[in-house]
Image (tube, helix red, strand yellow):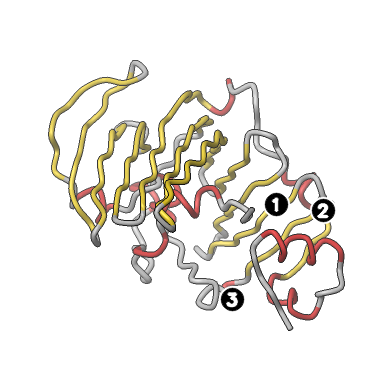
Amino acid sequence: MKVFDILTSVLGLGFLCASALGFADSENPSEQVACRYEMKVMSHANNKALTDHRAWFFWRQANMIQTQDADGDYGEIWERTDNGTIQYRKLYHTDKTAVEYMPADRPTNQMSFDWYKLSSMLSREELDALKLVKKTHVLGRNAELRKGKTDDQNIEVLWLPDEKLPAKIIRKDKNGSMELRLAEILSLSKAPRKPVDLEVIANYRHIDAADFGDMENDPFVKKVMAAEGHHHH
């Protein structure tokens, strides 16, 4: 089974603008929150419908975003530095290993990060492209139902304007659908489950993703590459 990049999958990075938007900090979401999301992905392959259900955690701080699967085995972390660059690592907690993706590697990995989108799961352009259908409430919070179409995808979003986060995202295209639902949202200080501490991550083994090709005999690298379906000769 392919290793699941939680937030990357939600973002649909395939149609993320390549240019950083560069909004002022005051316009970027900064409320420290802890969320638990439930996700359902349906794909149509070889005339068969495949469904995958997952729950995962999302933590947002002013300059750090972290995700983790429900079992606590795997996650991702983005950190924004003082000069505005974004550092990205995949975290394999069971193996106590972090795989680092350097900025120079990102074009080859089809990664281009927009901090607003990482913080909110939707870019401003995507949100503005969706028509406001009605205003409502969800989980005791103000919400907006928005619908539209982007790059052959039908998108429905239940948006929390105060928190700048989705309570629901549904994306559908000819290949299948992805449904994301917010199950719980708390301020980070009140959340029973916290992100992994940076000091803990600092003690992990760190590997540069660009070095994977030279580490084919490393047991961890071999396991990850097999899980992601890579075959190097």
View extreme (bottom): residue: 233
Q: Is residue 219 left or right of residue 100?
A: right
Which amino acid does the dot numbered 3 rest on?
Asp
- Please identify the quarter of the rendering in which residue 23 is found: bottom left
* Vertical comparison of 224 with 163: above or below: below
Q: Circle 2 — which element? A: loop
* Vertical comparison of 192 with 223: above or below: above
**Could you tell which of marks 1 and 3 lies nearer the N-terminus?**
1
Q: Circle 3 — which element? A: helix
Q: Residue 70 or 18: which is nearer the viewer?
A: 70
Residues at marks 1 and 3, CA–CA distance in whole angstroms: 17 Å
Q: Residue 214 or 188: which is nearer the viewer?
A: 214
Residue 75: x and y in percent read 64, 47
Residues at marks 2 and 3, CA–CA distance in whole angstroms: 21 Å
Q: Label 3: which residue? A: 105
Which amino acid does the dot numbered 2 rest on?
Tyr
Residue located 45% across and 51% down the image: 118
Which amino acid does the dot numbered 1 rest on?
Leu
Q: Is residue 144 left or right of residue 81?
A: left
Circle 1/circle 2 CB separation < 8 Å: yes
- Mark carried by residue 135: none
Residue 154: x and y in percent read 23, 49
Residues at marks 1 and 2, CA–CA distance in whole angstroms: 9 Å
* Vertical comparison of 164 with 15: above or below: above
Q: Label 2: which residue? A: 204
Residue located 42% across and 61% down the image: 13
Q: Residue 195 or 134: which is nearer the viewer?
A: 134
Q: Label 1: which residue? A: 91
Residue 192: x and y in percent read 64, 21
